[in-house]
Image: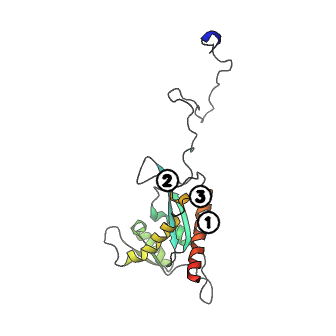
Amino acid sequence: MAGGRGVRGPAPHTPGRVERGRADRLDARLRGRLPRAREKRGEATGPSPVDRRKTSSKHHPSSDGGGIPFHMITTAANVNDVTQTFALVDGIPPVAGRIGHPRKRPDALLSGKGYDSNPNRRELRKRGILPVISRKSERDIIGLGKLRYVVEQTFAQLHQFKRLAVRWERRLDLHNAFVSLACSLICWRQLNTHGQ
């Protein structure tokens, strides 16, 4: 506003041409500035299966029979579970216990119907791992629910840390650091419980 409540003339420096590939940050239809690319999202986020308007992430854990997490992968919520099978198996660290070399792979892999895939079953058998996976078109394997409860318990322990139940970090490396810290605390609690 100019003096006397009149409208002043145009600004001396009018905006120049927008560079190729970059959108203008102001929009006449919206009041204010447009959000930057990926400003409200982060790496490994996608449409939530529960609420498509929101983006979220999903955790894929691998754990032993006692519920101790070996490896955890964070992906977008819309990533199919079956695509993470070999990343989870290959991420299991060598486990010492018996005399000799540390074990590098499990005897069997128990998982839910989300990991059902005939090519994956064949590849697991080639690696010497027995796949115990329910088929999508059939009823669950009898007794598998009790064994799968261990992984569900790992999920519950992981999501007791409220920072992981809802993802707040845009950067995936920061989120994975919190996941690693939570897994370490879960292992420490289990060792303290069994040590007493």
Three-letter residue code for mark 2: Ser
Quadrant for the C terminus, please.
Answer: bottom right
Nearer-N-terminus badge (2/3): 2
Q: Which residue is disc 1 drawn over?
A: 181
Q: Which residue is disc 2 drawn over?
A: 56
Q: Quadrant of residue 112?
A: bottom left
| Residue 101 position in % (x across, y down) | 63, 85
> Going 43% across and 73% down the picture, which residue do you hit?
149
Q: Secondary structure at mark 1?
A: helix
| Residue 66 position in % (x across, y down) | 50, 78
Q: Which residue is disc 3 drawn over?
A: 175
| Left or right of residue 172: residue 116 | left
Q: Secondary structure at mark 2?
A: strand
Residue 92 visible (yes or no): no
The image shows residue 163, relative to residue 19, as above or below, that is: below
Q: How many marks?
A: 3
Which of discs 2 and 1 lies nearer the camera? The answer is 1
> Going 52% across and 53% down the picture, which residue do you hit?
45
> Going 52% across and 73% down the picture, which residue do you hit?
63
Three-letter residue code for mark 3: His
